[in-house]
Amino acid sequence: MIEFHNVFFSYQPGKDILKNINLKINKGELLAIIGPNGAGKTTLIKHINGLLKPQKGYVKVLDMNTKETTVALLARHVGFVFQNPDHQLFAETVEKEIMFALINFNFPENEIKERVERILHELDLIKYRNKSPFMLSGGERKRVALASVLCYDPSILILDEPTIGQDFHQKLNLIDLINKLNKEGKTVIIVTHDIEFVADFIPKCIIMSEGRIIADGPTEEILTDSKLLLENYLLPPQLVEISIALNINPPTINFEKLVSFIRKIIERKE
Amino acid sequence: MGIIEVRNLTFKYANSDKPSLYNINLSIDKGEFLLITGPTGCGKTTLCKCLNGLIPNSYNGDFNGEVIVDGLSTKEHPVYELAQHVGLVFQDPENELFCTSVEKEIAFGPENLGLPRDEIRRRVEEAMAMVGISHLRERSPYELSGGEQQKVAIAALLAMKPKILVLDEPTSNLDPFSAYSILNLLFNLKKEYKMTIILIEHRLEIAAKMADRCAVMNDGRIIAIGPPEEVLYSDTIESIGIGIPKIVKLVKTLGLSSRPLSPSVLADILKVKK
Amino acid sequence: MNIFDFEYKRESSIIHRLDPRAKLVYLILFTILTVYFTNPIILFLVFLSSLPIAILGKIVKKWATSIKGSLFFIVFIFIFNFIGIFWTTGNFIDTITISIAMAIRFISLISIFSIFFLSTSPEDLMQSMIKLKLPYEYVLTFNMAMRFVPTLAKEAQTIIDAQKSRGLEFEKGNIFQKVKKYIPILIPLIISSLRRAEIIADAMESRAFGASKTRSFLYTLNMNKKDFIFIIICIIVFITFLSLKIFFNIQ
């Protein structure tokens, strides 16, 4: 569904940000892209909706070559939620904000009305429909930005650092929404620094470092390899650190498994 | 009397319908490392601004109660005077740094005080050494990484020679490695330079181990305060939206009686040999 | 990057080390020359006089980029003037002469300002303005605005990307529709700037801004021999050009 083939990209000649990226993401996957600052994560995801085009190689999204397709056409299928909602919000009311993309994509008027109603309900924004988006709190503005992208039902959803500034409950709400969308068949890609969030909730992850893909696989395998993580300037999740301190091999990111391992250790001592 | 005394502090922003802070009472000792956490909107940032006088001096609203910092009441002294006793570091370093070199950035504060040039020079050198960024002196702040920028921001405040440093989620825009580096720096500042550190933080796994006390806020009130193990293991804060460290959840599920905050301490308790 | 890429970068050239006041003299005198003369050959000579300064300042590449970036405007000015003057006078030679002159005048101004801003650090500029007895708050405001231009440019790009990702297409539509499309760019930029301004104000106050009426400076500017030599050279060149008017009546 999304394919990167021998992709190279640089903003300035001589300084490649993406080096020989080869990647296949299948329909319906839920994955996280992690890596140190400057690894090229944001540059990579901007290739998926065509904001950036590769200098060498190609990127295919839903069988469309991004070099031959406009951003608007790709954006119809790839919903991109930027890190800072304030970079998107501009309309007089929340309702008009949500309508923006629908109008741009030429949805018929009755469908626009229906979709706006639906998304306002789904994201608990009904009471704000006539309010100015700038009057809302940070978390609420994030929801509006998300709503304005989800309303047109893109089959691929990209979230750039969705957990920054979110507290525990907000993160739970977020993952509930992500899981719901994933179950509906959407491909969801999350770029994040929050390794705990990935360890707890995201089944697949990709490590990027210095413009390359270092690892690509199930989260349980990748985040328990602390050597791999440290080599790429990432800190292992807490449960992995605890596993290592307690000589539990292999380390695990699964809470229940760790509990039962430790219970066995306690029993053995008794 | 602590170096910071907050007495019956209630504050409501002018354009808000309910107070952001209700009846806050807090006494912070000199040299203490206090960790404050709580869900979004609990009033943490508002409290920070009350601690360095931005509230009530620069923000309109209903301010009741008292905040006394290093003997000075924030109601009766301007921010620029309080700035020499308490430094405030914000979340996003990009908006805190506005000079063309790290050196000049750090000099900005002392320059504002009208200090003689050799004193300014001395303070700049000292601040850079305390934070470990002397090698960055000629660099432009916006070329630096987020972690380095935050260190410059901290050095810029240290040049004012405050006894207290208040930091409002300084690591939230940083990657974990840089976050770790900043938190370590803060711990050093407390240990070596005996500074009082007040840190608002979500990453409790690392910060909790460094703090002397931890306070949890919710809805504008402090609902728990005490040694980190006591607070984080208590049942009262379980239902609030804060990121309780996994080790706490683990130990509680296992039903153990001790309250470790780090994996190595847990290993000791279970007598696991490396 | 673009025509307004007047971003100061640290270099150790002679021109960078000159006191901003000396460069200000250069800026004013040569701007006067550019605006005063209408003869395209003279104007071209005035423009050429920027070249040695750019070379000495080791900023030739960036200086050339600014000029290259303004090519669109230069052509526009040429065409605009050409049509306007030909329409009025019908005289082909006059039209060409004046149109070229206008275009060169524009390039010259871009060149002079570009050299000034590329080689002067905002702080030094700020200090020189203070030494010229301009009020500190205004000087600082101007300085800050300059410092945040690259930040705003970066943010504008992010906002454009974000709105393009919601289907906004800049190429489509008539002129009115195209202008309307900038609203989703400008509003977030303005709001973001307002929010940023508040944070900066807090940060400055937290570093005792306003504490003392007599603010001190870590680095002070002192005019030295090189500055005065530079000023004298500028004055000599200025007078030389002016004498062309006086003695040969060249406009």
Image (cartoon, coloured by chain):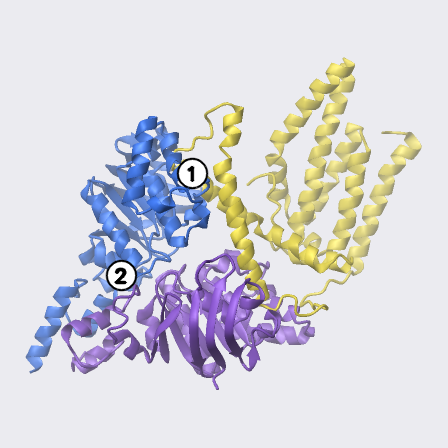
Chain colours: A blue, B purple, C yellow
Q: Residue at x 53, y 78 (%)?
A: B69
In this rendering, the answer to whether C211 lies above or below B26 is above
* Residue B156 sits in quarter: bottom right
Q: Mark 2, chain letter?
A: A
* Residue B82 sits in quarter: bottom right
Image coordinates of residue C16 in percent, x first then y, are 68, 54
In this rendering, the answer to whether A31 lies above or below A231 is above
Q: Residue at x 29, y 34 (%)?
A: A60
Disc nearest the viewer among 1 and 2: 1
Q: Residue at x 74, y 56 (%)?
A: C129
Q: Nearer the viewer, residue A123 or B138?
A: A123
Q: Which disc number belongs to residue C163?
A: 1
Residues tagged by mark 1 and mark 2 found on one chain of the structure: no
Quadrant placement of the C terminus of chain C: top right
Image coordinates of residue C223 in percent, x first then y, are 78, 60
Q: Secondary structure at mark 2?
A: helix
**Is B228 left, or right, of C101 in this rendering?**
left
Q: Mark 1, chain letter?
A: C
Disc 2 target residue:
A196
Q: Nearer the viewer, residue A252 or B58?
A: B58
Q: Are marks 1 and 2 in contact (CB under 8 Å)?
A: no
Outermost residue toward the top? Answer: C90
Q: Residue at x 33, y 71 (%)?
A: B206
Q: What amino acid does circle 1 point to?
A: Gln
